[in-house]
Amino acid sequence: MAHEEPQDALTTAPGVPVHLQRVVTGHAADGSSIFAHEGHPPRPGEYSKIPGMVSRLVWATEADTALPHTGVDPTPGVTTVVPPASSTRFLVVTFPPDSVFTADAFDAQAAISENLALAPGLAERFEPDGMHATPTVDYGVVLDGEIWLELDHGETRHLRQHDVIVQNGTRHAWRNRGERPATLAFVLIGVRGAR
């Protein structure tokens, strides 16, 4: 496969492009390692109704995923961002400052409709205040900026670049109280659970 250079220099924050360069390995017929996919993920999830919000689905596995990799990119066929048990989703999400949601021009109903289209399976779980829970264990890394993780009873933790999170299916919300976007990488692992 030919190497493609990123054609888009748009960034949501210093060093975090809207369109990421994704490199996926696989196996040739003889079993040798190869580059199976290279380029931008096909589903960048750039929001127009929530300025600065981007949810990039980088990769996905299902419970029956096996090696060697078949060469088929699974991301176009994903119907839910929340993985079923024993499945995974790899996302890179940029959260705009909370001030976006309180701006006079913000249309909450249009944002909800767009979120339902771009984040199926997850958007339906959001409460009006942004709190939500999923039957997943989520590993997260703050790639850029800072963000606040809110749990029940208003308890929060301020997270900065390079902080890591293990989110065990708890009810939570992400709050960006800063003045610039925050970008996090997440791996969601579907587990059996009550939620």
Image (cartoon, rainbow, N blue to C red):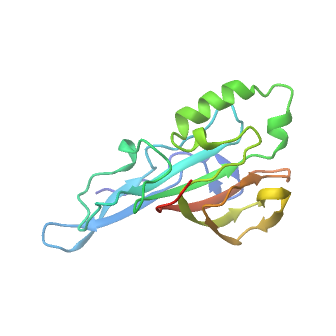
* Image coordinates for residue 70, horizontal then vertical, percent: 23, 58
**For the point 62% across and 45% down, which residue is it?**
54
Residue 71 placement (x, y as % from top left):
25, 56
Residue at far left of view:
30
Q: Does residue 168 sit above or below 114 in this rendering?
A: below
Determine which quarter of the picture holds residue 100. Answer: top right
Residue 4 falls left or right of residue 138: left
Q: Position of residue 163 (x, y in %)?
A: 71, 72
Q: Is residue 141 left or right of residue 28?
A: right
- For the point 34% across and 50% down, the residue is 74
Image-based side of 122 in relation to 70, left or right: right
Residue 20 is left or right of residue 75, and the answer is right
Q: Quick check: 6 above or below 157?
A: above
Specify the farthest residue to the bottom: 32
Could you say where residue 47 lies in the image, as x and y percent from the top left?
A: 62, 36
Q: How many marks?
A: 0
Residue at the image point whose x is 27% and y is 52% from the top: 72
Residue in the image at 75% along x and 25% along y = 107
**Front residue of this view, candidates 156 and 164:** 156
Image quadrant occupied by the N terminus? bottom left
Q: Residue furthest front?
A: 194
